[in-house]
Amino acid sequence: MDRRFVVLALVCGLLAGCNKSGGAAPSGATAAANGPASAALAAAPDSAAGPPPPPPAPTYVTAAQPTDIPGVTAQVAYVRQYDGVLHVGVVLHNGNDRRVHADQPIAFKDFDLVDAKANRKLFPLKDALGRYLGGPSDSAVQGGRWGKELAPRSDTLFWVLFDAAPAGDTVRLEGPVFHSFDNLTPTEGAPAAGAPVASSAPSLQAAVMSAERANGELHVRVRIDNPGDRMTGDQVLSYADVYALDPIGKRSYPLLKGADGIFVATPLDDRVNGGRWPLYKTGAHGQQIMDLTFPAPPDQVKAVDIVLPWFPPLEHVALSGVGGAGPAGVAVAGAATPLQRALADLKADVTPQAVKVDLSADVLLQIGRKIKKVRAKIIGGTNAAS
């Protein structure tokens, strides 16, 4: 057979194969191009889209300082406020080659902010169910606390939400393990929309793909990625601890639950506490799409925070669509005490053992008269009863 004929036949065969593979789009691409929005969303996490962008490089607003845990330092990652809520993030850096933990669980009730200008102490936001808005949390005891170990050579972000401070005021952050950070000035405004956030379960990250409101429901799709070479830890995400937060309306919205007691969320690994999914199932260089369904906030709510256990809040997620369910959710409120301001006005000498106040003679005289009147009423009431 002529060698030139053989070569020509091979070339034609190759060209025919190329035209066949390039002439028709894959079925997934066809659905994304011609189908409804839901088909486009389903195609979005395909590996052809490439790896997700990494979370923003960590920045800190304070220098690192020692903690009560040997080999562990703390830094403030952010102090920002918008929509009436102040967001605080503190990172614990474990510089040890082994796991370590605090002597006592880190309880969110022990965090507070002291307004350096108004001398007011602010306590974390707390919902009507008694849960503090902070994380990560592995127990509902005391309104939420963390008792797990810090992984070797790891950075773990602790976040807490407070009522906003007056613009321009500096605050002091107080809390367990790190004690305090002084002269913090909150920045104004939300972080960049859509940016992925790093988990306290190395090396996961999460980002919101969509948030659509319709027919009284809010459907949120989240993509969880593991860009690392391995997954460590035993963290399990419990859907009972997932909620959407409306910071302006001060309401949180837990996931909807079916008649079978299971939350409307996927993926689902077991039915404990309404449904759970182990984060460690996201293997090296893997990804997982998570679908969550909440009662829809009213239509006037334009953005919410999505809170997932083991992740900092996915902040200021814009909502598309209408069809809110009206007033619903769980009330959220903060607390503050004017004690510090009152003591400052009185020029009190405050020590860990006592509070000393110097009062003028006329004030002491008035106090003595009040005591006598009260004592006389008590004695008179006792005599009348006898």
Image (spheres, rainbow, N blue to C red):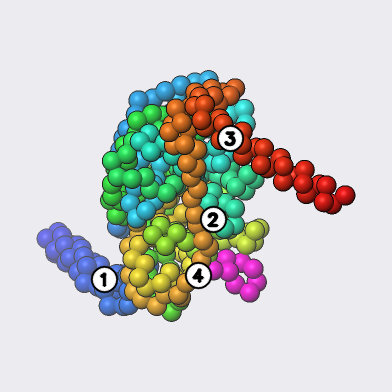
Residue 303 as seen in the image, left or right of residue 350: left
Q: Amino acid at mark 4?
A: Ala
Task: For residue 258, say whether it is visible.
Answer: yes
Position in image of residue 119 (x %, y %): 42, 36
Position in image of residue 67 (x %, y %): 49, 24
The numbered mark, 3 or 4, whose residue comes first in the sequence reads 4
Question: Which secondary structure is most common in the magenta stretch?
Answer: loop
Nearer to us in this view, 16 or 369: 369
> Distance of mark 1 from mark 2, alpha carbons?
50 Å
Q: Label 3 belongs to which residue?
A: 367
Are the two marked residues, 3 and 4, in contact with CB atoms closer than 8 angstroms? no
Disc 1, SS: loop
Magenta extent: 256-267
The mark found on residue 25 in the picture is: 1
The numbered mark, 1 or 4, whose residue comes first in the sequence reads 1
> Distance of mark 1 from mark 3, alpha carbons?
88 Å
Position in image of residue 300 (x %, y %): 35, 70
> Distance of mark 2 from mark 3, alpha carbons?
40 Å
The numbered mark, 2 or 4, whose residue comes first in the sequence reads 2
> Distance of mark 3 from mark 4, alpha carbons?
49 Å
Disc 2, SS: strand
Quarter where residue 302 is shown: bottom left
Q: Label 4 belongs to which residue?
A: 328
Residue at 55%, 26% in the rendered image: 355
> Distance of mark 1 from mark 4, alpha carbons?
45 Å
Q: Amino acid at mark 3?
A: Ile
Q: Would you say residue 48 sits in the magenta stretch? A: no
- Mark 1, mark 4: which one is toward the viewer? 4
The numbered mark, 1 or 3, whose residue comes first in the sequence reads 1
Category of crowding for the residue at label 4, using alpha-carbon neighbours closer than 10 angstroms: few (below 14), some (14–19), many (at least 20): some
Q: Label 2 belongs to which residue?
A: 127
